[in-house]
Image (cartoon, rainbow, N blue to C red):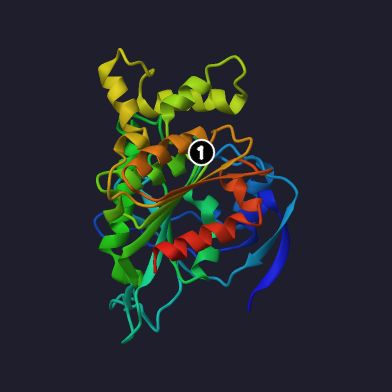
Amino acid sequence: MRKAVVCGAALAATCVSVVVWSPQAAPAEPSPATISPAAAPGTAADTARTRRSPDRADGSVTSGSAVMVTPSLPKFGTYSFGHDRRQRIDAYWRPTAKDARPKTDAGDDRRVAVSTAPGEKPRPAVLLLHGGYWLEGDKSGWTYFARRLTDEGFAVFASDYRLAGTGADAVWPAQRDDALSALEFVKKNAGRWNVDPDRIVVVGSSAGGMLATQLGTYGEGGSLVRGVVALSPVNNPYLAYEDGGVPTADARQRKLRRAVIDLVGCTPSPEDEECWSRVTDADSATHASTGDAPMLLMHAADDFVPVAHSTGLASALRADGVSVTVKTVPHVGHGTGQLTDPQVYPRILAFLKARTR
């Protein structure tokens, strides 16, 4: 049974709680990873942290209140897809008709085997990528959205990735590599959650939106994911770098300009060939080709990441026959702030369902 509650929009992620498994996972094996209870999304500590920091990590600020549907609690686990502490992914899913957790003689409950009942169709999945200027933010920001999507029949996965500016191994394309690895992890272990590995779509916000469009265009993107939804995606980092350098740039645009330097590990310049190759590679439009994934790209009307980031990509994709819809949403915040518009979630859901039939 669903019920509606009214919550401050900035506290959306705190209106829900999740169950967290605690055994440590080895990177080579998809076992739940250890997670501190204080850091678990939906705990009292997480709620207090959100209340102290209404500004979202992806640069958006929300205000007022929103009517939110409280979904029933899905199964939840945090897994490791690499050795770095940021190479972690949260999974949200509903039990299948047969959902067994065989225990060892020692009572160890780490290995979870999902067995699909006869005639039960594998479900589609959504991979979520968080925003935060590639410098900050984490997967827990998607908790409410993920839970709501599980009520619609999806298995949902929210992934972290290495943050720019944290070391030599976190320079671009480390973030795309991590997003690709997270996607591969889900496909390789699809049977665990009764997921159809050929029906996966990706949703990203801001910096995570750019990673989502990278998945949709990298190589033959349509063979990786069935579709892409990106909210305020920074699809052209060099454009963001330039916009942040004009005299009228606001604080968020200036921060994004500095973030681009951290992302590519250099100051963008066509004269620096090595640097320029990374800047070009980080522009999703440069990867556009026939066979890429269809996309829904959305920006706020007054977004500090302007819609030009998506119209440029859309033009490149359409030239190769790829379906793209670009929407401008009035009177909302940046990135996930767009979800406060009552028409945005239904539009996203309709796209996800259409792409995973």
The residue under the point 58% across, 28% down is 252
Badge 1 marks a residue whose secondary structure is: loop
Q: From what the image shows, is residue 311 above or below residue 271?
A: below
Residue 339: percent from left, percent from top: 61, 52
Let me know if residue 58 appears in the view: yes
Q: Is residue 207 left or right of residue 62?
A: left
**Residue type (three-letter) at the residue carrying disc 1:** Gly
The residue that disc 1 covers is 132
Residue 120: percent from left, percent from top: 35, 82
Q: Judge by depth and name the residue closer to the eye, 227 or 197.
A: 227
Mark 1: few/some/many CA within 10 Å (<14, 14-19, 20+): many
Q: Is residue 351 left or right of residue 69?
A: left
Q: From what the image shows, is residue 349 above or below residue 328?
A: below
Q: Judge by depth and name the residue closer to the eye, 323 or 226.
A: 323
Residue 149: percent from left, percent from top: 51, 65
The residue under the point 35% across, 51% down is 293
Residue at the bottom extreme of this rendering: 118
Residue 190: percent from left, percent from top: 30, 66
Q: Judge by depth and name the residue closer to the eye, 308 or 180.
A: 308
Q: Is residue 307 left or right of residue 64?
A: left
The residue under the point 47% across, 38% down is 310
**Quarter of the view holding residue 177:** top left
Let me know if residue 258 appears in the view: no
Q: From what the image shows, is residue 244 above or below residue 342?
A: above
User: Which quadrant is home to the C terminus?
Assistant: bottom left
Count of marks placed on residues: 1
User: Which quadrant is home to the N terminus?
Assistant: bottom right
Residue at the top extreme of this rendering: 271
